[in-house]
């Protein structure tokens, strides 16, 4: 009887753990518009963004990494400027915390 209970518990746990291993991938982009002092010397450009996140259904925590590239060109020359940025974020799901108490 113990083996059957252990097998049933593992059978319920394995799909949850397997689901946690699938990362969430996101892409985006848009207009980058300079302002202030940069507005007089740079034209509007574009930016591209990519994100990858990993969450764990049993825990209210998740991790996400973002990367962006911006490109702007000078108004009076043909020079281009690229700005690269990246972040790593930890997130906490408050709704999942409420579900743990029930």
Image: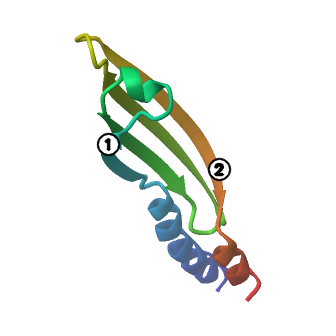
The kind of secondary structure element at disc 2 is strand
Q: Nearer the viewer, residue 81 or 77?
A: 77
Residue drawn where x is 49% and y is 25% of the image: 37
- Graded by Cα atoms within 10 Å as few (under 14), some (14 to 19) or many (20 or more), the crowding at tag 2 reads few
Q: Nearer the viewer, residue 73 or 17?
A: 73
Q: Position of residue 95 (x, y in %)?
A: 65, 77
Q: Nearer the viewer, mark 2 or mark 1?
A: 1
Query: Which residue is identified by label 2?
Result: 90
Left or right of 37, for residue 29: left
Residue drawn where x is 54% and y is 48% of the image: 64
Res. 39 image quadrant: top left
Residue drawn where x is 68% and y is 82% of the image: 99
Res. 59 image quadrant: bottom right
Identify the coloring: rainbow
Residue 65 versus residue 96 in the image, above or below: above
- Graded by Cα atoms within 10 Å as few (under 14), some (14 to 19) or many (20 or more), the crowding at tag 1 reads few
Mark 2 / mark 1, whichever is N-terminal? 1
Left or right of 90, for residue 74: left
Residue 47 versus residue 8 in the image, above or below: above
The CA distance from mark 2 to mark 1 is: 27 Å
Q: Which quadrant of the figure contains the N terminus?
A: bottom right
- Please identify the residue farthest to the right as the structure is shown: 101
- Please identify the residue farthest to the left as the structure is shown: 78
Confirm or deny contact between disc 2 and disc 1 (CB under 8 A): no
- Please identify the residue farthest to the bottom as the structure is shown: 102
Q: Position of residue 43 (x, y in %)?
A: 30, 28
Which label is found at residue 69? none
Residue drawn where x is 56% and y is 71% of the image: 13
Q: Give the number of callouts.
A: 2
Query: Which residue is identified by label 1?
Result: 31
Q: Position of residue 47 (x, y in %)?
A: 34, 37
The kind of secondary structure element at disc 1 is strand
């Amino acid at each position: 009887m113990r083996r059957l209970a252990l097998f049933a518990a593992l059978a319920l746990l394995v799909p949850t753990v397997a689901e946690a291993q699938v990362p969430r991938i996101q892409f985006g982009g848009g207009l980058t518009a300079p302002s202030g002092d940069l507005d007089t010397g740079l034209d509007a450009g574009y930016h591209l963004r990519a994100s990858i996140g990993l969450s764990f259904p049993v825990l209210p925590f998740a991790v996400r990494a973002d990367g962006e590239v911006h490109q702007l060109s000078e108004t009076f020359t043909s020079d281009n400027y690229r700005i690269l940025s990246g972040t790593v974020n930890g997130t906490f799901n408050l709704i999942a915390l409420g579900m743990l108490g029930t």
